[in-house]
Image: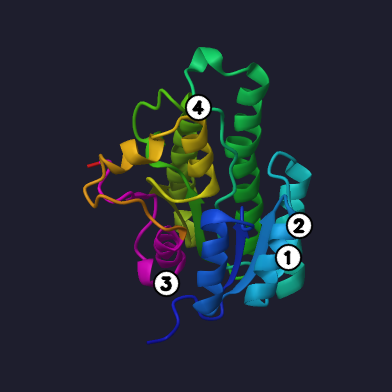
């Protein structure tokens, strides 16, 4: 069979580690030209070398940096066909009255405003080049209901779900599809940090998963790859749970 993303130009944010790095590897293996973006250049350089890709240092809390990452993708590869908006920042686990205002502001700046700015720039770049394409945002299973341990993170991710759906309605007539994935327990650094802060968290979550295990980042990346590909050509406005049945 043809490679899933053959010939496509895709920007991946949060590409230095976790799901983003796994996605960059998968997208390249499936034939895409990948631009990696994240804050930590050392991590980016290692992944880019591994896949023979390009990278740009990008801070999602800085709108100019986000826009520049999209522009760098176009200047390097000539156009933009798709984007995987995976970059995010976590929060210290605990109830909402324990989250400092500056930490809440950081959640907003990265997990919502950064996504908003990225999507606006990506839509403009797709319009100017390929004319049609696909955008996939990383949400979280924690955005689909109450999230007492990560209330700021869950709230911003739920807002991102709304933005995903609104964008799908807005840009669908132009041939730009917009979807999101909602990972569950995935063995990333963010989940490991949560487990360190509250030992037993991973075991507790996995105990509620019908498949009785956590996901590897590469498994979550597979869902993003499908949504970015032409094989999902009639799918838009979806927040796809990739959680082993946790949200069932």
Q: Closer to the observer: label 3 or label 4?
A: 4
Residue that label 2 marks: 41
Vertical relation: 143 (above or below) 126: above
Q: Is residue 129 visible?
A: no
| Mark drawn on residue 237 | none
Residue that label 4 marks: 93
Mark 4 and mark 3 in contact (Cβ < 8 Å)? no
Q: Earlier in the sequence, mark 2 or mark 3?
A: 2
Q: Earlier in the sequence, mark 3 or mark 1?
A: 1
Q: Is residue 140 visible?
A: yes
- Cα distance in 3D space between marks 3 and 4: 38 Å
Tell me where the magenta segment starts and ends, as one range.
Answer: 218-247
- Residue 40 percent coordinates (x, y): 73, 52
Q: Residues within 10 Å of mark 2 (few under 14, many from 20)?
A: some
- Residue 184 percent coordinates (x, y): 37, 45
Q: Residues within 10 Å of mark 3 (few under 14, many from 20)?
A: some
Q: Residues within 10 Å of mark 4 (few under 14, many from 20)?
A: some
Location of the N terminus by quadrant is bottom left
Nearer to us in this view, 194 or 24: 194
Q: Secondary structure at mark 1?
A: helix
Q: Secondary structure at mark 3?
A: helix
Q: Residues within 10 Å of mark 1 (few under 14, many from 20)?
A: some
Vertical relation: 161 (above or below) 57: above
In this picture, residue 229 sits left or right of residue 79: left
Residue that label 1 marks: 45
Residue that label 3 marks: 230
Mark 2 and mark 1 in contact (Cβ < 8 Å)? yes
Location of the C terminus by quadrant is top left
* Residue furthest out toward the top: 97
Look at 73% across and 45% down and name the residue there: 59
- Cα distance in 3D space between marks 1 and 2: 6 Å
């Amino acid at each position: 069979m043809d490679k899933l993303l053959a010939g496509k130009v895709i920007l991946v944010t949060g590409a230095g580690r976790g799901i983003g790095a796994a996605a960059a590897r998968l997208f390249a293996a499936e034939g895409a030209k990948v631009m990696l973006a994240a804050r930590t250049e050392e991590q980016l350089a290692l992944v880019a070398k591994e896949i023979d890709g390009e990278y740009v240092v990008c801070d999602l809390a800085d709108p100019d940096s986000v826009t520049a990452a999209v522009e760098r993708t176009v200047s390097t590869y000539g156009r933009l066909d798709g984007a995987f908006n995976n970059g995010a920042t976590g929060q210290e686990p605990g109830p909402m009255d324990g989250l400092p205002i500056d930490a809440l502001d950081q959640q907003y700046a990265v997990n919502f405003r950064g996504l908003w700015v990225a999507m606006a720039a990506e839509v403009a770049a797709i319009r100017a080049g390929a004319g049609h394409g696909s955008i996939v945002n990383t949400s979280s299973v924690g955005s689909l209901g109450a999230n007492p341990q990560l209330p700021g993170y869950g709230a911003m991710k739920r807002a991102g779900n709304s933005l995903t759906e609104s964008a799908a309605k807005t840009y669908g007539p132009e041939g730009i599809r917009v979807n999101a994935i909602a990972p569950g327990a995935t063995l990333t650094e963010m989940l490991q940090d949560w487990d360190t802060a509250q030992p037993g968290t991973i075991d507790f979550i996995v105990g509620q998963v019908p498949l009785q295990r956590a996901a590897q980042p590469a498994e979550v990346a597979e869902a993003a790859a499908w949504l970015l590909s032409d094989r999902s050509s009639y799918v838009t406005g979806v927040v796809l749970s990739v959680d082993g049945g946790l949200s069932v």
